[in-house]
Image: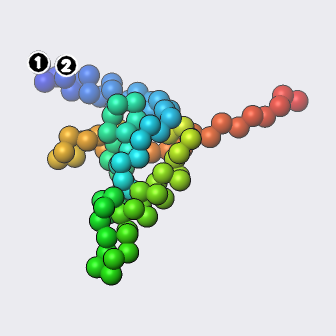
Amino acid sequence: MEFGRRGAALAMIALLPATPAAAQRVIDGDTIDLNGTRWRLWGIDAPETHQACADGWAAGLKATAAMRSLIEGRQVACEFRGHDRYKRSIGSAELVVRIWAPRW
């Protein structure tokens, strides 16, 4: 019975709509912190921030800068998809766009 309640609670959490949040911190090219939760972005595998290619090209710094330019100053929502081996939440991210349209 305990498992049934836990499963139902997890299912309810999974059904909650993703709440937009201002991106608080970019960790690297595939990881961000939003409202105290560390999110590993689903479907993205970027180099670590201080990782460089064999020829010295700063791939990790470039990936981190690219992620920062994508989400900095914007509202981001993550949809929960599970946890990875480091206990980070895995989620697909969406930029929230607000469009103002006059009433006619």
Position of residue 77 measured from the top left corner of the image (x, y, whole percent): 47, 37
Q: Residue at x 28, y 79 (%)?
A: 54
Q: Which quarter of the figure is the N terminus placed in?
A: top left
Residue at the right extreme of this rendering:
104
- The answer to whether residue 77 is seen in the rendering is no
Please tell me whether residue 47 is drawn above or below residue 35 in the rendered image. below
Position of residue 17 measured from the top left corner of the image (x, y, whole percent): 45, 30
Label 2 packing within 10 angstroms: few (<14), some (14-19), many (20+): few
Q: Are marks 1 and 2 in contact (CB under 8 Å)?
A: yes
Would you say 84 lies left or right of 29 here? Answer: left
Q: 90 and 33: which one is in front?
A: 33
Residue underneath mark 2: 5
Q: Residue at x 54, y 37 (%)?
A: 75
Q: 20 and 74: which one is in front?
A: 74
Q: Residue at x 19, y 19 (%)?
A: 5
Amino acid, disc 2: Arg
Whole-angstrom CA distance, mark 1 to mark 2, is 7 Å
Amino acid, disc 1: Met
Label 1 packing within 10 angstroms: few (<14), some (14-19), many (20+): few
Q: 6 and 31: which one is in front?
A: 31
Position of residue 31 measured from the top left corner of the image (x, y, whole percent): 35, 49
Residue underneath mark 1: 1
Q: Residue at x 33, y 77 (%)?
A: 56
SS at badge 2: helix
